[in-house]
Amino acid sequence: MTLNRNLVVYAAFNGAMAVLVGAFAAHGAGPAVKTLLTTGAHYQLVHAVLAVACAIWGEKLAVIGGWLAATGGLVFCLALAFIALLSMKAMGAVAPIGGVLMIAGWLLLAFAALRKTSSNA
């Protein structure tokens, strides 16, 4: 088991951004954008936590899954924020990319857990 420090740092910044976006949604955003910002922050925070777990595990496929999940959460959150705050409706085409990355991260984690290795055979 080897800690992937770079992934932990990336996930920590994602987590901090998610809290900032969520706080803005709760305290500074108008009703028209609150739901989009809250949704984006929620997904980003969940996937930041997933990335930390993958970084702690250290298994190669799990770490790759962590990078995909955290990047997907970031892309998804930013796409929703651009839609909400800048009225960039075209970012609606970008949000699913984040979703696919998040799904891929979870699937890689599952595959890593099920994969038979010499150490757990």
Image (cartoon, grey):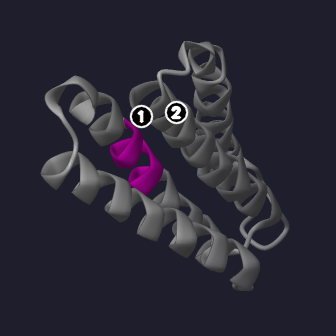
The quarter of the displayed image where residue 16 is located: bottom left
Residue tagged 1? 85
The quarter of the displayed image where residue 103 is located: top right
Residue 108 visible here: yes
The quarter of the displayed image where residue 58 is located: bottom right
Q: Residue at x 55, y 21 (%)?
A: 88
In the figure, is residue 35 to the left or right of 118?
left
Q: Residue at x 34, y 38 (%)?
A: 37
Toward the viewer: 51 or 62?
51
Magenta region, main secondary structure: helix
Residue 119 counted in the magenta span: no
Toward the viewer: 104 or 93?
93
In the figure, is residue 7 to the left or right of 29?
right
The local secondary structure at tag 2 comes to helix
Q: Which residues are magenta?
A: 40-46
Q: Amino acid at mark 1?
A: Leu
Dividing the image into 4 quarters, which one contains the N terminus?
A: bottom right
Image location (x, y in percent) of residue 13: 55, 71
Say which mark, if any, is on residue 82: 2
